[in-house]
Image: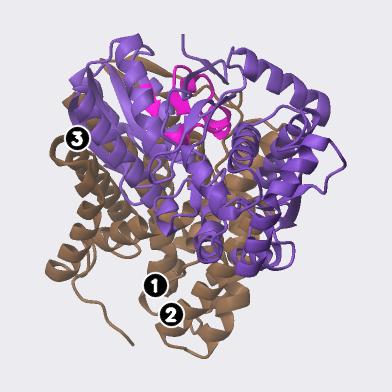
């Protein structure tokens, strides 16, 4: 039973990690608490669902299109809402309020269009039935999520650490004012970062939708609170931190529900959030000081 | 009002005389407030269909005390303020001596006091919330609340499936699922079924693996679940994926009695057990006749709301007959004592004007995406 619970925790943790990944990039690099992030997660799942149901596309094709579409919407929303604020060097509260309004609008639009009841991918879309593996009950979608969590983190770390674009992104995270002087198109870079982060959200939405069969417009809203806990624990903008923190939160939640009491499960993530802010505000992997220009 | 009832009472003997003479009568009119438009119109329309079908039969059999019975419908749109206006209209200008409805509990809470103050009996056929009949002595309901259905389901699980020890899961952050859980807990204790563990979840949770893995390790005979269709479907899917055998049934409250569950959970929903105040395939003659007549008249299958309305109209007609006329007070007293045996089973009121008899509750199980009666 313990090994099954550890595996359950691994899957939940990977779920949190892939959700938090794009969020931590958006938050850490662009320096805005963009609350619309959860919507891109729902949007990805809903688009992929629509493509498989209405157009009978195979899941992998729906996945790719949904990932691109979520990225594009994220870049569009970012440039519409935040470009002006960035230029005016508006305080963080302004972007928080603007994205809060946009989030409410986007959610109510999508729920009035398609309703709020849960949907699932057609059962034939992917073989989700569980099987026995080394004494554990696992399903293909669970393995996919765990694999995707590591692959997505690996890809993102590569992009940020080992490419020219990544260098610019790191510079932007460090000194947003300076990069324009260094010849970087800051607006385009912000849109690119939004695109990457929206795509990651969309990918997470499709994967999690496939595993839990509970797709509805507000599914992103549910994840946002846990997402906050994970990115703060992991350190803002840190992809590896998001993975480790996601796994820690998922594992602790599962073990709490399995061995303590399921009613305390949700308290764990938020207790960690509070503890982190208290003891180590920069997060597990964050740098010790956060300087503001 | 008072002078009017006096006149009515004074005229009563003459009415009886005319009735026996068999001459044409002005109909006895009762009011009905139902949600015939708006989002709840599915319920309201089914209820009206049930009333009308029963009304035809009552009038074919000679009406009430020789006079035909008529129903004056008012559409509330499912809105409490429209329902209040409708009640005032029916009582004040149509002078009805009894009101059927309204459709929703949220409508009954403001409408019940209006009827009660004016001493007009009001009979809800679909209002299951707690506290409806506490409004006053003129407020009745014929729909079985959840609290009466769940114990029947659990008893059937114990007697027919030999369930002795269960695990319980409930949505702790939702008033409906929490109150259904309270009922389940009390019923389990009363039936002497052992509860191995009680696990909670959030109404919007999607991951139930931790709770179900723990439950799997305890080897229960069944899992008692108080959840809405969304979380319930997720639990059924996770239960199957974790390899908990199909012989370990999920026993649910009314939240799982939804077509959404097999849509999302597919064959993982098979074996789910719920109780229902009525079921279309009930094999007794009264029910077969009702279903056939309903299909013939409306060209669709009746639902639970139509069935409840159908029985209620016979019950009310019987009470008016027993009261010997249209005096609302006499009708109220007759109604309180009325008994009737119809498509829902045998019926009578408790002292608190709630349904007294749960023998009509049907326990149904999911098989191949459809409910059928548990044998």
Looking at the rendered structure, whether the residues under marks 2 and 3 are on a common chain is answered as: yes
How many marks on residues?
3
Which residue lies under the disc numbered 3?
Answer: A258
Q: Residue B124 appears at what percent x and percent y?
A: 55, 47
Residue under the image location 31 percent in, 32 percent down: B209
A269 vs B49, left or right, is left
**Label 1 belongs to which residue?**
A173
Which one is closest to the eye, mark 2 or mark 3? 3
Q: Colour of chain B?
A: purple
Q: Please identify the quadrant where the N terminus of chain A is shown.
A: top left
Residue extent of the magenta highlight:
B250-276
The alpha-carbon separation of the residues under discs 2 and 3 comes to 45 Å
Q: Are marks 2 and 1 in contact (CB under 8 Å)?
A: yes
Outermost residue to the bottom:
A88
Residue B308 versus residue B139 in the image, above or below? above
Residue A80 pos. (x, y %): 63, 76
Give the residue number, with chain letter if any, for mark 2. A176
**B57 left or right of B360?**
right
Q: Which chain is brown?
A: A
Q: Which numbered dot is residue A55?
A: none
- For label 1, the SS is helix
Residue B255 belongs to the span the image colors magenta: yes
Give the residue displayed 68% in from the left and 47% down from the top: B44
Report whether residue B37 is seen: no
Tell me which corner region of the image, top left, top right, bottom left or bottom right, holds residue B7: bottom right
Q: Is B251 one of the magenta-colored residues? A: yes
The mark that comes first in sequence, 1 or 3, is 1
């Amino acid at each position: 039973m313990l090994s099954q619970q550890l595996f359950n925790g691994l899957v939940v943790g990977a779920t949190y990690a892939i959700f938090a990944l794009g969020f931590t990039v958006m938050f850490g690099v662009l320096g805005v608490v963009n609350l619309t992030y959860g919507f891109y997660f729902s949007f990805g799942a809903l688009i992929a669902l629509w493509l498989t149901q209405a157009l009978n596309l195979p899941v992998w094709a729906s996945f790719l299109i949904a990932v691109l579409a979520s990225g594009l919407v994220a870049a569009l929303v970012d440039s519409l809402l935040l470009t002006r604020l960035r230029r005016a060097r508006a305080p963080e509260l302004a972007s928080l309020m603007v994205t809060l309004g946009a989030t409410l609008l986007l959610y109510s639009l999508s729920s009035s269009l398609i309703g709020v009841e849960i949907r699932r991918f057609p059962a034939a879309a992917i073989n989700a039935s569980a099987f026995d593996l080394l004494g554990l009950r696992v399903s293909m979608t669970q393995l996919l999520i765990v694999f995707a969590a590591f692959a997505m983190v690996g890809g993102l770390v590569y992009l940020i650490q080992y490419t020219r674009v990544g260098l610019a992104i790191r510079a932007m995270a460090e000194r947003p004012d300076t990069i324009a002087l260094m010849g970087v198109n800051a607006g385009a870079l912000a849109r690119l970062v939004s695109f990457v982060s929206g795509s990651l959200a969309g990918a997470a939405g499709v994967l999690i939708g496939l595993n839990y069969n509970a797709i509805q417009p507000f599914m992103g809203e549910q994840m946002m609170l846990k997402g906050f806990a994970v990115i703060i624990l992991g350190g803002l903008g840190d992809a590896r931190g998001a993975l480790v923190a996601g796994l820690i939160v998922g594992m602790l939640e599962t073990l709490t529900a399995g061995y303590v009491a399921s009613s305390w499960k949700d308290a764990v993530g938020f207790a960690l959030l509070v503890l982190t802010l208290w003891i180590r505000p920069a997060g597990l992997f964050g740098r010790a000081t956060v300087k503001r220009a | 009002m008072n002078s009017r009832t006096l006149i009515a009472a004074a005229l009563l003997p003459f009415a009886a005389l005319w009735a026996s003479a068999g001459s044409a009568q002005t109909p006895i009119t009762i009011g009905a407030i139902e949600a015939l438009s708006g989002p709840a119109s599915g319920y309201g329309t089914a209820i009206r269909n049930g009333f009308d079908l029963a009304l035809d039969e009552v009038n074919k059999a000679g009406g009430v005390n020789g006079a035909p019975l008529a129903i004056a419908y008012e559409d509330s749109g499912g809105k409490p303020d429209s329902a209040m206006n409708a009640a005032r209209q029916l009582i004040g200008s149509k002078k009805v001596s009894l009101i059927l409805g309204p459709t929703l509990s949220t409508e009954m809470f403001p409408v019940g006091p209006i009827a009660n103050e004016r001493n007009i009996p009001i009979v809800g056929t679909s209002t299951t919330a707690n506290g409806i009949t506490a409004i006053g002595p003129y407020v009745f309901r014929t729909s079985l609340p959840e609290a009466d259905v769940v114990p029947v389901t659990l008893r059937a699980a114990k007697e027919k499936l030999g369930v002795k020890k269960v695990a319980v899961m409930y949505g702790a952050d939702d008033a409906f699922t929490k109150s259904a859980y309270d009922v389940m807990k009390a019923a389990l204790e009363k039936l002497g079924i052992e509860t191995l563990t009680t696990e909670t979840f959030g109404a919007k949770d999607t991951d139930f693996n931790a709770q179900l893995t723990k439950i799997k390790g305890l080897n229960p005979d069944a899992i008692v679940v108080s959840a809405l269709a969304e979380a319930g479907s997720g639990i059924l899917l996770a239960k199957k994926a974790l390899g908990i055998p199909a012989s370990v049934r999920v026993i649910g409250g009314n939240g799982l009695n939804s077509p959404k569950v097999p849509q999302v959970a597919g064959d993982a929903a098979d074996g789910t057990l719920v109780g229902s105040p009525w079921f279309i395939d009930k094999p007794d003659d009264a029910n077969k006749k009702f279903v056939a007549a309903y299909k013939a008249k409306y060209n669709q299958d009746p639902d639970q709301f139509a069935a409840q309305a159908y029985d209620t109209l016979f019950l009310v007609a019987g009470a008016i007959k027993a009261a010997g006329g249209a005096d609302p007070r006499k009708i109220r007293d007759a109604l309180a004592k009325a008994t009737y045996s119809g498509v829902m089973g045998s019926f009578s009121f408790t002292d608190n004007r709630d349904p007294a008899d749960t023998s009509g509750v049907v326990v149904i199980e999911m098989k191949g995406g459809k409910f059928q009666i548990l044998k």
